[in-house]
Amino acid sequence: MRLLVTGACGFVGSTLVRELRVVRPDLEIVGLDNFIREGSRSNVAPLRRLDVNVVEGDIRHAADLDALPRADWVLDCAAEPSVLAGVTGSVSSFDVMDHNLIGTIRVLEYCKRHSAGLILMSTSRVYSIAPLAALPVKAIDGAYRPQQFQPEIGLTPAGIDERFPTSPPLSLYGTSKRCAELAALEYADAFGFPVWINRCGVLAGAGQFGKPDQGIFTFWIRSWQAGRPLAYIGFDGAGSQVRDCLHPRDLVLVLMRQLDGETPQPADDGLDLRICNFSGGAENAVSLAQLSEWCGRRMGPRDVASVAQPRPFDLPWVVLDSSRADRLWGWKPATPIESILAEITG
């Protein structure tokens, strides 16, 4: 079997390639990357030593995909990952759509041409902002906790599940990924190739460079280590906002089942079997204040500033409920948050 991995030299792509090589040494892997992200070239030599064919190319360019050999599956890890992309910073609004939607459509054309299956790495940010922003929360032990739940729309004590609305506003980033999901499902139904959509929360672990768009956990720890300024932004100004995290290697076993053509048993919930949350969940969730306490114990205390004005699209509590992944695939996160944070710290 030949697997094409897009974004293969990014953190998620390179981690999954290395882990897949361990569990399936017979798998032929072609890795595609455009190397626009700082540090991504450092992953080329290690992947080539694992007999991965690393190719420089861009999913937005049809000619780059046309030049690739036929694959049986594509694992699409290429994306502009920041929820603030297109609104702040150097990435334009068009760039976000070009990377995350047009690029995915180019990949889907490749899948159509070669009858290749697609595994699309998606995100928790496809879930609607408005009901999450309006969620009543209370700070308990330095972390926000929802004060009410709505299981009928997918908001449970375990987190946000696949029933939760995906209507705008989502952010430009979230909309680009949701549109990519819909395009993948349409192509799959029209042209008869398999698609899996794996929605993840914050993915974290060693190998990230501490950039804000790679997720708050690595950014916070690396900044703490380097003595760079840190601030609790918005909400109560005390760092009570909560996110969960997942190590990408925990996805490998379900990826192998998807690549091997397994189909889970019907869930009897009326939802599409091809879309599923995979995340750390409530047990792997912490607030920024709790993360600061952890950093202080490991690396020594330091001051964190407080900024009253929130950033666009920030939310007080985003925790994904992966219980459906357990029902469908028998999947649960395997790496506890303490181990993830320790791995990042080094």
Image (cartoon, rainbow, N blue to C red):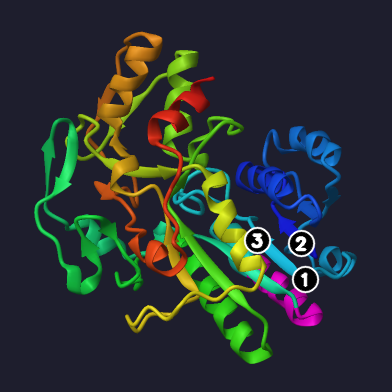
Picture coordinates of residue 17, whole percent (x, y): 70, 48
Picture coordinates of residue 97, whole percent (x, y): 57, 64
Contact (Cβ within 8 Å) of mark 1 with mark 2: yes
Q: Does residue 261 appear to the left or right of 212 in the view shown?
A: right
Residue at 57% x, 85% y is 186
Q: Quadrant of the N terminus?
A: bottom right
Q: CA distance from mark 1 to mark 2?
A: 6 Å
> Is residue 23 or residue 324 the one in the foreground?
23
Residue 105 part of the magenta segment: yes
Furthest-bottom residue in this view: 190
Whichever of labels 3 and 2 marks the residue nearer the N terminus, that label is: 2
Residue 80 visible in the picture: no
Q: Does residue 57 appear to the left or right of 81 in the view shown?
A: right
Q: CA distance from mark 3 to mark 1?
A: 13 Å
Q: Quadrant of residue 18?
A: top right
Picture coordinates of residue 37, whole percent (x, y): 67, 41
Three-letter amino acid code at disc 2?
Leu
> Mark 2 falls on what kind of element?
strand
What segment is highlighted magenta in the picture?
102-115
Contact (Cβ within 8 Å) of mark 3 with mark 2: no
Residue 78 visible in the picture: yes
> Is residue 165 or residue 331 the one in the foreground?
331
> Mark 1 falls on what kind of element?
loop
> Mark 3 falls on what kind of element?
strand
The residue pinned by badge 2 equals 3
Number of the label disc, if any, that sits on residue 76? 3
Residue at 71% x, 57% y is 6
Whichever of labels 1 and 2 marks the residue nearer the N terminus, that label is: 2
Mark 1 surroundings within 10 Å by alpha-carbon count, few (fewer than 14), some (14 through 19), many (20 or more): some
The residue pinned by badge 1 equals 72
Residue at 50% x, 42% y is 247
